[in-house]
Structure formats: structure tokens, C-alpha cells
Amino acid sequence: MLEFNENEGIVRKTIFIEVILPLAISKTYTYRVPHELVENIAIGKRVVVQFGRSKIYTAIICLITETPPALYEAKYIIDVLDNEPIVNEYQLKLWQWMSDYYLCHLGEVMQAALPSALKLASETRIVLNTSEEIDKSILSDKEFLIVDALELHPELSVSDISKLLGQKTVFPLLRALFEKNVIIISEEISDKFKPKKKAFIILNPQYKEAENRKALFEVLERAPKQLEVLLAYFKLEKQQDEISKADLIETSGTSASVIKALIDKEIFIQEDKVVSRLSSVDLEDIRNFELNEAQSYALQETEQLLNEKGVVLLYGETSSGKTQIYIRLIEQMLLKGDQTLYLLPEIALTTQVIERLREHFGGQIGVYHSKFNDNERAEVWQKVLKGEYKIVLGARSSIFLPFKNLGLIVVDEEHESSYKQYDPAPRYHARDTAIYLAHLHKAKIVLGSATPSMESFYNAKIKKYGLVTLKGRFGGVKSPLIEVVSIAEETKRKTMQSHFTSVLIKEIKEALERKEQVILFQNRRGYTPVLLCTTCGYTPKCINCDVSLTFHKSSAKLHCHYCGYKQDILNACPACGSTRIEQKGFGTEKIEDELQRIFENARIARMDLDSTRTRNSFQVLLNDFEEGKIDILVGTQMVAKGLDFGNVTTIGIISADSMLNYPDFRAFERSYQMLAQVSGRAGRRAKQGKVIIQAYDTSHRIISQVIKNNYEEMFDTEILERRNFHYPPLYRLIQLDVKHKDISKLVVIANSLAKILRAQFGDRVLGPEAPMISRIRNYYIQTILIKVEREGVSIQKIKEALQQILIHFDSQPVNKGVYMHIDVDPY
């Protein structure tokens, strides 16, 4: 399109851009570029645009064109925010693939991908960064006004700031303040991931002189316990350079209060230093480690298969030394100058891996996860963009970072369900997305696990992926002994104590006597899952969801684990007035409570979602457990992931049946993975561990396969079931959750949709059915499942046809008020 400028007497081309807005809209949107901004335009830069009547957003340029939109008049962009693109071509291709594959909008992918600081909108909240001292002399007049207003009001929206300054766009000003570290974007304010700190004790330098030291001994003669600590200090001083507070307490046999008294007298000085989570011996191994024969062979095989296939599944049992192989592969990438992405299922649960890699690679490694606040996430984004970080360690969201020359992706514990994003869209799987990301960059990808997912192992079996097997535990540590105990048998013999068999009680007692640690696993949080009136059968349920409320002793309330609703505990049944209310079932809280009654002197702690909510609570728990301040750790699946403690010798699985009997086609696979991973926490270093599995069905094939450590037998039996009943990895699943507040309307609408889908896809369509929890947050749910065979059918054509059906379905007035959740690969 050409435009004549009367003042300059020349004809100029009019430039249009297509942008991605951070909204759930089905298309990109076209804007016109003012002539004065044309030279600043580039794909991947952010622009400030108006969308709708008054909303202002930052959007990403994805296309530059001279063709105006045919159906509407393009508005002008307001401003260009960046000097250089913040999103590269690889990312835009990845976003488009995710939008197509996971049947979601491009704007939803953008919303998930960018840190909040990079996608400001009218209603974004801004607060002052109180952790930094603000130098107001470096601020412009308008920046000064914004800071002044934020000192009076703790939080302002972008719209508020716009009104304050009397100008339409304030994004460049906010960007400048953000870069000066003056403001924080409040959408993403969260606790910073804290390093581990350890207390060290130093003798006051004045007592280095002989005369002062003699006087000190005379003073402390009247305080024999303090004198003991001082003598213990001098003894340790001869053996080691630094003396930790914990070592001094252990050597002197006194308490922390005695050391505090010496600090108060200024005889000792306490210094808190950041330390690694691994012992110095382990760090020495990591700095100068040599691969054993099995690892060397596995590394060679991995390198060869990566060149042939591009994707390799490294199948190595727990503690076999997979991390050392990853380190060798990463070293090769550094020599080439390529970047590496190391994916972990949950960053907070894998602190030790972070420290291990940081110790080896130092400042070249960046960490990216949701525990960082938005300033930090944006900073990591910029450093990856500039190539300052050669290695990025992160949770699933780190696949969105702007890598330029990605050479290797490592997906550790690739079987973990944490890699799957369930809400909101895009409902992606980080492992599968990482494989496509590697394909875009022509990079290599290693999937590591002791208990691989059925999908990955199947792909390795059919030679789509390379398969490398690593047997044996590193350092010759023996695998734990596993004993299965019948709950039914012990109940009959009346040898059960609360929820614990006599065998488990005996093992815990012996471990405590040996000063060893114990981990107990129960995959349900709270105190009791169900309260029941024994007179009329009434059970309290959530007012918003079709689910019974769980009693939490810590809050003395009944909680809904789906929407967060809480209510007071019942003293009498509201239905019949009876006071005979019984607690049925048990969660981690109750296990902790009952254990304390049996082992009165044991130090017991709980690790679940409730106990790790507060600031740094997870780190405190890990530190205390590692330093031996906790004897027994009770936890949910959190305890199965990433914990590596040398003094844990006994593991107890309280109820294996609860996992095995879960109504899901992946129940047996997940149970095997969970039981094997929890068992792998026992005897990680010099000592052989012991695992006690409590179950009613002690002869269950999954339990026997865990005991034999026979993953392949589990895979063979499961794959046969999956083939017969049309489930992954032989079939693909697309799940449609249809939601409405009116149950009668929902049933009619869901049946109508299923009928249309059956006309198109035949008997591949199942449902609609009410799921196990059929109402969440006052929305009733009906689920439709589409099963598509992998062979002989184009999944892309199926998805395209499905999208057309859903667009037509949404446009019908009769379907107003319906929400649709599409989940591709819902597992």
C-alpha cells in the first residue's frame, strides 16, 4: 500500500504488522505502523497497541507486510518497546506448533511463555522494589512522579499511572524503571529461591594471644559447660579449617544455648555462610569424578545413538550415576559453544542437582522457575537471549526461553507427571514440546529415567528413539531389600498399631536406635479424607464442588482440595443431629500425629503441600533433615522426587493399595513408578536400605514387579492391555471437558456435541460421561474422549476437523454459557 505525503512530496509505502496479543483469540491481529516508527519495526519486538475500546497491551510482531487487512481498518500502533527483538524465530515456530498441536490459541501460548514483566497490559499491577535503595537522582521528571505516587499508594495499575501522567502510553517509562530495578510487576511476586546457609563459629581474634587465652580459661572455670565447648573448639581447630556450629554441638555434647552464651560474651563469633547441599566428599567427586566402566560404555552408546536418532532414552536404575553422564555431554556442548537446557520436573525438589551442576559449571549456569520473582525471570530471559548463560536448569516453563544455538536438551526423570501443564491452556507436555524444540534447533535430546514413561519406552522399543541401559548403582551400593507386609493379616492377628504393621514399627525402632533416618510415604495429605455420620451416613461436602471435605488438624477445619473452600469441623450431624461422627481414612497429618504417640522421643516432620506453602519452608525442611535434626520424614509424592540423603536407610509405604486401585488407565504404570522411586530413596550411599510396603493385596503383580525391579515385565503386560483397550502409546487421546453451571443444559449440550463428533469420527468418540469429580467451582462437567489410532490416520486432519466443529458449535446461541477445555494427550 502506497501513501502520498503532501509536505515532503513523496510517495511512501505503508507498513502493516501482524501481532500476537496475550489473549485467547483465534487469530493474529493487524496494525498499521506510523512512518516515524517504520525503521524500529522487526519481527520478535514488542509493540504497544490498543485492542478493544480502551485496553492497552504489549504484543509481539510476528509478520511485517504491505497488505492491509481486508475486513477491518487497521489502527496505528502506539509505540515500539524494544531496541532488539526479545523473541526469536525458533520461539515463534515453537509457539505456532504448540497452538496447532495442543489446539489452543497463539495468545495463550504467548501468555504462558513470556514473564509478566515483558507483557504489560492496562490492568497490570506495579509496586515499588523495596529490597533496593532508590537513587532518585537518576530518574527523569516523569519517572520521579511515578515513584512518588507509588510511595503514597503501595500498588498502582498501568491505567492509574497513565491517568496520573495524562498520557496514553507509559510503557517505555515503566520499562526504564524496571531496568533500573525500581519497580516490580506484582502479578509474579513470589519468594526467591534461597541458598542453603550454615552457621560457623570463630574464636574472637583477641583470644589468639596466650595471655588473653589464659585469662579466658580462668573466667570459664566457673562455667564448666562453656569450658567444655571451648576445649572442643580447640580440638576441632587442629582437624579442620572451618568449624560449623553443628560440629561443635556434636563434639562438645552440649546444647546450642551454651554456644549462644559464649557468643553473647563475645568469646565466639557466629558467621552464616552459603554452603553447598552436598558434603565436601561428594563435591570432590563431582569436580574430579571418573566414570566407571558401565557409565563409560553408556556414554559412548549415548553419543553414537544421538548422532543416529537425535533422541535417546537413558534407562538407568535409581542412583546408577546418570547425572555424571549428563555432565560429560554438557561439557561437550560447552566446547562447541552450544547452549544446553536441563529440564527437571520440579525445581524446588531437586536442589541437589542444581548445586551439583553449579559446582561443576559455575557462573555459566542459569536457573529458571516459578520461585523467582518477575524481575529475576526477565533477567534470566535477557541473559539467555544475549548468550550469557550456556546452561539453563529449569522446570517446564524454561522450554520457552529464547535459545539461539541450543545443542542439547536433557529431560531428567522424563516420566514425571509434573511435566504436564493441566490449567490454564496451553495444556502442553514439556517432554514432548522439548523434543520438537530440539528438532527446530537440530539439537540432541536425552530423556533420563529409572522408570520411563510407557510412551518413551515404546518409542525406544520400535527404534524411533535410541535406548541406552545403565545397570547397577554407582559406587557399588546395593539395591534396597523390599519386604511386603499384609495389612489384612496383621489386622486379623491384631498386631497393627494404628496404621502401622508390627514389621514397620520394628524397622523404624531399629533405625532410630542406629541413629539412622526414616521416610514414610502416604499419597494423601490432610488428617482424614472423610468424616462420616454413623447414624445416617451423612458426609460433609464442598458447596462448590462434588467432593467430600478433608479434615486438617493443623487448621481444625474441613478443606476442599479443589477450590480452597473451608468450613468448621462438625460437632453434630446437620442432617440427623447425631453426635456419632467418625473419621475415615488417613492422610499425612494423621500419620505424623500417630507416629508421635508411638515414638515419643523421635523428631518427626511432614513434607506435603500444606507444610511447604510458607516462605522457604521447603528449604528449612530439607536442611533440617540433611543435618539430622529430623528422624522421621512423613510425606506425599514429594518425598519420591530428587531427595538424596546418605543416612536414610528405612522407607515405609503406608498403603500401596490406594495408588493401585485408582480409576485411571495409567494407575499401574504410575504405581510402579512411584513405588520404585520411593524405594530408591533408601540406602543411597554406603548402607543398604530396607523398604517396607504395606498392602492388603500383597500378591498384586505391580508389587511383585517392583520387588524384582522388573520394569520390562510391567511394560509388556501393560502394553498388551493398552493395545486391547485402545490407549496410549498405541492410540492418541483428545479429551474435551464441557462445562456449564446448569446440569440439565449441560447434559443436552454435551450429548449434542458428541452426536456431531460421532458423525465425523465414528466410534473413536466415547461419552459424554460425568468424570469422577463432576462439579468443580460450581461448574458441572461432562467429558468426551476421542481415541485416535497412531497408524494409518492423520492426527493433524482429525484436529483440523475437530477445530472446525468446535468453532461452529461455539457460535450457536443455544450453547451460550458453555466452557470448553481441550486437552491433547491428557496424561
Image (spheres, rainbow, N blue to C red):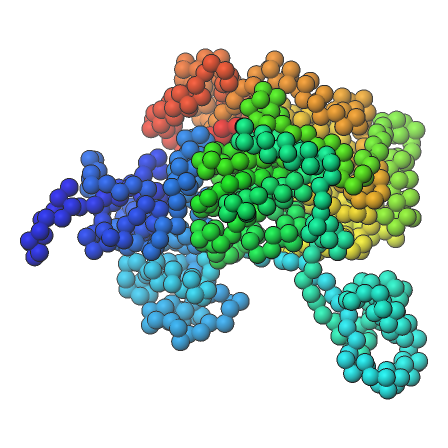
Q: Residue 392, can we see it? A: no
State the residue in front, 208 or 608.
208
State the residue in front, 589 or 440.
440
Looking at the rendering, in which quadrant would you find the C terminus?
top right
Q: Name which residue lies at 88% across and 64% down.
A: 251
What x and y, as percent, mark residue 799?
Answer: 42, 24
Q: Name which residue lies at 73% across and 36% down.
A: 293
Looking at the rendering, in which quadrant would you find the N terminus?
top left
Q: Name which residue lies at 31% across and 51% down.
A: 47
Count numbered badges in the picture: 0
What x and y, as percent, mark residue 639?
Answer: 72, 43
Relative placement, left or right, of 365 versus 4 is right
In the displayed structure, would residue 201 be above or below residue 386?
below
Relative placement, left or right, of 823 versus 713 is left
Relative placement, left or right, of 135 versus 557 is left
State the residue in front, 314 or 22.
314
Q: Name which residue lies at 20% across and 41% down.
A: 66
Relative placement, left or right, of 96 versus 343 is left
State the residue in front, 208 or 804.
208
What x and y, as percent, mark residue 280?
Answer: 75, 56
Q: Residue 468, can we see it? A: yes
What x and y, as percent, mark residue 368?
Answer: 54, 50
In the displayed structure, would residue 681 be above or below residue 288?
above
Q: Quadrant of residue 682?
A: top right
Q: Quadrant of residue 294?
A: top right
